[in-house]
Amino acid sequence: KVVDDDTQFLSFSVGLPDLWFEPTFAYERDIDRDEGTYLNLEIGHTFSVVEGKEEGDDDILSFRVSLAQGWGDQRRVTAYLGEAGEGYDEACLMDTCLKGELTWNITDGVSLGAYLAYYDYLFDSSARDAASHYEGTEAYSDSYNLVTGVSIAIAF
């Protein structure tokens, strides 16, 4: 049985940023709550908006667009969708994500980023229906999420 306690995750990701398609694979394992596994495959491409001053410098301003697809095993899906609405407890393709990220490299080692992402359960109508009840309120809402964020990264 899944409980609402805090949990810990084991996460691993690997990517190839220097290729045109910039593939990234991520693995996540919940080690406390549901012991479920989530896999994510993303492809993206970074476009230079304002190039660096010299050859080899990072872009001053860049825009990255990406498309990702997640998959959850039965334990992960049940933890997120099994208790809501009609419930859903099968391994499935989970969230599909379309994201745009704008990154401004302020100085060497300091960058400011902003992103906008659209998430939905596009490939499984039963999971999409369960996701529309994700909050457990028994009230129907949309299965998609529109998420924005801002980040500051400092490397040294």
Image (cartoon, grey):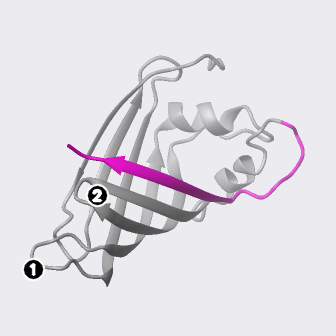
Instruction: Name the element at disc 1.
Output: loop
Q: Determine the residue positioned at 35% across, 74% down.
A: 61
Quadrant assignment for the C terminus: top left
Circle 2 crowding by C-alpha within 10 Å: few under 14, some 14–19, many from 20: some
Instruction: Name the element at disc 2.
Output: strand
Q: Which mark is residue 24?
A: 2
Residue most toward the left? 55
Q: Quadrant of residue 20?
A: bottom left
Above or below: residue 110 compared with residue 7? below
Above or below: residue 52 compared with residue 153? below
The amino acid beneath tag 1 is Glu
Q: Quadrant of residue 90?
A: top right
Q: Determine the residue positioned at 42% across, 59% down.
A: 112
Direction from residue 76 to residue 46 in the image, left or right? left
Q: Determine the residue positioned at 68% across, 59% down.
A: 144
Q: Which mark is residue 55?
A: 1
Query: Between residues 156 and 135, which one lies in front from this camera angle?
Result: 156
Above or below: residue 100 compared with residue 53? above
Query: Between residues 117 and 95, which one lies in front from this camera angle?
Result: 117
Quadrant assignment for the N terminus: top right
The amino acid beneath tag 2 is Thr
116 is within the stretch colored magenta: no
Circle 1 crowding by C-alpha within 10 Å: few under 14, some 14–19, many from 20: few
